[in-house]
Amino acid sequence: MPYADKPLPDLLRQLRADLKRTSADALATLTRPRAGLAMLSVTLPRALCTARHLAALSAEALDVADDATTWATHGTNVLSAVRAATNAIAEHVDAPDDFGRELVLTQAGQRLLVALGRDTAEWFRDEAAQPKTGETNDASTSASSDLDAAATLILMVEVNERDEMERIRDHLRRFATDDTAGAFVRGLAKEAESSLCVVLESIDSGHDANEALAAAAECVGKAVRARDEEEDAATRAPRIISAAVAEAATNAVPATDAPTPTSAAVGSVTMDELPEGDHELISEFIMECSEYLESAEAALLHLEIAPGDLEAINTVFRAFHTVKGTSGFLGLHDIANFAHEAESVFSRVRDHEIEFAGGIPDLALGALDLIKALLAEVEIGLSGQPMTRPSNYDAVLQRMASVAGSVAPAEPVLVAPSSPEIIAAARLAIVQDEMPQDDASVLREPRSAASELSIRVSTDRLDRLIDMVGELVIAHTMIAQDEHVLAPGQHELAAKTNHAGKMVRELHDLSLSMRMVPLKPTFQKMTRLVRDVAQGLGKQVVFATEGDETEIDRNMVDALSDPLVHMVRNAIDHGIETPDARAAAGKPRQGTIRLSAKHAGGSVVVQLRDDGKGLDRDRIIAKAMERGLIESAAKMSEAEIFSLIFAPGFSTAEKVTDLSGRGVGMDVVRRNIETLRGRIEIESTRGEGTLFTVRLPLTLAVSDGMLIRVGKERYILPTTSIFKSFRPDREELSTIAGRGEMVRLHDQIMPMFRLHRIFNVPGAVLDPCHALVVVVASGEQRVALLVDELIGQQQIVAKSLGDNLGKIEGVSGAAILGDGRIGLILDIAELLVLVRGGDTGTGAARAVA
Amino acid sequence: MSLEPGAAAARTSVRERCGKFLTFFLHGEEYGLEILKVHEIIGMLPITRIPRAPDFIRGVINLRGKVIPIMDLRTRFSMPAADTDEGCIIVAQIRGLQIGMVVDKVSEVCNVSPDEVEETPSFGVEVHTEFLLGLAKQNGRVKLLLDIDRVLTLTEFAAANVVAAG
């Protein structure tokens, strides 16, 4: 007897746990009879053993006798139901006749479900009503239990059990006369009751009562469901669980969406308290776990495309395993238990016992999310606040357990050791010992590799380093331009300064690159998003990414993520049509969304392309006119019309959905991107799709700039945007209507803008033939800027103009020049908008004629 | 500037209007700025003009590697522009942001007690007084106590900024 020395309350808990597990196993049996039976054959005897032992013990121990006896009775009842059903399944699992087999399975399944559902219901009710005395139960509860009892009995009753049937009828009658229940439900109960009367009569008269019994059963079932619907989900969660479980089982997929309504009830369970011990270790653990989970998520999404990829399965398995091992060791039992189940599921996937199909991907992703949530809670816990267990913890855990079918409870957890050496040793031990032989190799290799290749540095330090190096660059430039260094006869000094300059620049490049991270995690997030959103909208979407190794400043990654989320959602919601609509339009049923990134001209270009229905030009115009954004679209270019969707409050969606259509999305997108000094452009062809192009600077710290002079003022042009500069001849210049100036470069004619006019600079060279034309490129466009002279190239560290200045049009930031003064960095794209767009602002008004 | 003159002063308690003030001269008038808001006082530095900015923004300066906008208080208060030899920049720090203000001359740090403070009289629309916390009479002189937050937040920029960010 393994339980001999355990106290009663422990046994009770054990029984509950066993029951839960058995229920889960039994459920699994329904979908995969053979594997499920194997599991049941282990869990069932164990649970039975506990139940019997408990019953025996409870007779002696009076203090908990009431509770325990009830439980033992429950337990044994349920277990015998389970056993009966199991036997039925076992007998018929190999039956040649498919129909018969199915029938038996269904019947057995229903019985199981009712038994289990009721068990769960009882369990929750016990929890709720403590101390539990028969008298305190209110009328509605007792009425409800009548219905429950009837529901339970009717599915178990055999046609020849007359007494049983009478009991059912009594239950139903009691329920039907109780006015706490809704009229509709009572009506159903009455109907069931009369059916039962027919059954009884049939039995008495020797007729076949099966049909009438089935009718009665159906009525009761309906009544139970109706009542559950009527009742508040929060207070009646247990019954909803049983309903949900039943529903899930009929769908023959491990339950996926069922537990949602229960969350409210199960929520706010306090998590285990944070164990005493090294909080630093825990925060390190959280960081480590997040990494593992991220790679697991990537692998899971990959698995959906290539379900057989062993490497990906191993990655997921490893992630769960590591999380389990470490969290268990740190005393985070909630996480450990959870990860254990997840691991079990995946060990079965790996061993080809179950396929990565059906509800498994959802389950696994759900599990990942849950572990993330748990980790977030632990993080909260670290700051000393109470932790709450995510509301769907139990639900997901149970579903996993049902699939995992593992026998062993969560592995015992070590007591927290005191010294770091022991910790390290113990950690290693966990890693090595808990693993089955073949897993060890899988696990050890990447761990050691990772630890050798990188170290963690806090971003604060990194940012400070980069700032300091930036200052160093400036300081060096000041030295290099010092008159003593530049003086004739100072070759030695100049050479040394030059040498130092090279090192400084290299150091600067290096420090900037330290902050560069690939876009991969961001793209991966989108992969997940596409999957979930498309599923939610019933659309079929293939998501392809390209260039996710493109690197971008870490500070920009997060800021890029939000607008991308909006855009991707929009693309699925508004862009991609439903499969039927696509088929009707002669397109493949699956829509394609392609997210790509690349470096181009000193910036990062992120493109999002969908092959959906494209933007509706006419509707945008209509909507914009309705909103008073424009008066007529007569002179607007395609691009200008499309960019109307970025106006605040603009939405052409026919109906507002959860995802998009509220019109808050796109203006936020543009604002976010502009904060990053980026731009967004739209191209769209009706019926063929839309392409969003986002251009962002590589980093917010620009590295190369060309210093130019206009009048007495100096500005910096990003070197990457300069295409060519030359002093124009008279015949290369021409005007339109005497005002619009143009310059010809080879065969290309481009508009020329005078910087001194745009910026209202006095004292600039007015004759273009004595000034300098700088051809700058912005996107596809090329325009000429008239400046006085180019001073020279310089390494610059871009700084923001300060938050209290707001956005200065045409200026992207400032940099400190060699003489310590500030030079403004020009933003070509904005300058173009400034001179082109119907800007009636200060600049144009004040421009020197 | 839709706010009624004196509204700012009416909202501020006496407690906020006393304490130590840094006083400076602007077109012959003596103004006071809460000492806690003053970050530092620096001599004139070369200022880089910012194109297309309102005229009371003189530009930006490099303060030990930081870019700080400079406001011309004379222009801000619609006084005739004039650079004096003693002109300097008071760098104020408000809600973590630094902003410099060009003033004619820094005077002294004085203690203003509650009984020396008076409400700003109303002049109707002719004279804007919403930048003032109140008036302090000391040694026969009147010191105008600046509500620096309002000087800054009521700027057109800040308004533009709010639109951009909100």
Image (spheres, grey):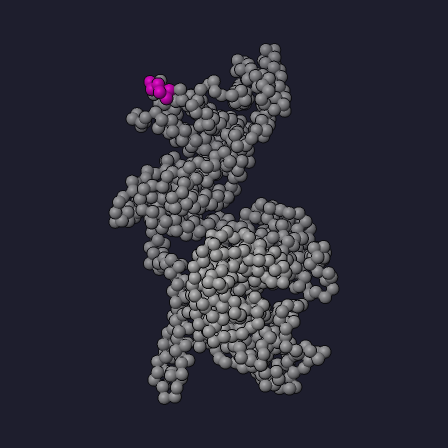
Taking the image as shown, residue A691 lies to the left or right of residue A289, namely right
Name the residue rendered at 48%, 43% in the picture.
A366
Residue A669 pos. (x, y %):
57, 57
Q: Quadrant of residue A335?
A: top left
Establish if B98 lies above or below B85: above
- Residue A191, visible in the rendered structure: yes
Quadrant assignment for the C terminus of chain A = bottom right
Residue A154 pos. (x, y %):
54, 21
Of B96 and A526, nearer the camera is B96
Name the residue rendered at 74%, 64% in the picture.
A634
Of B125 and B163, nearer the camera is B125
Quadrant assignment for the N terminus of chain A = top left
- Residue A340, visible in the rendered structure: no
Q: Does A61 lie within the magenta span? A: yes
Establish if B28 lies above or below A660: below
Q: Residue furthest top?
A: A204
Find the magenta span and give its range: A60-65
Residue A834 pos. (x, y %):
62, 69
Residue A27 pos. (x, y %):
48, 32
Q: Does A680 lie within the magenta span? A: no
Q: Residue furthest bottom?
A: A489
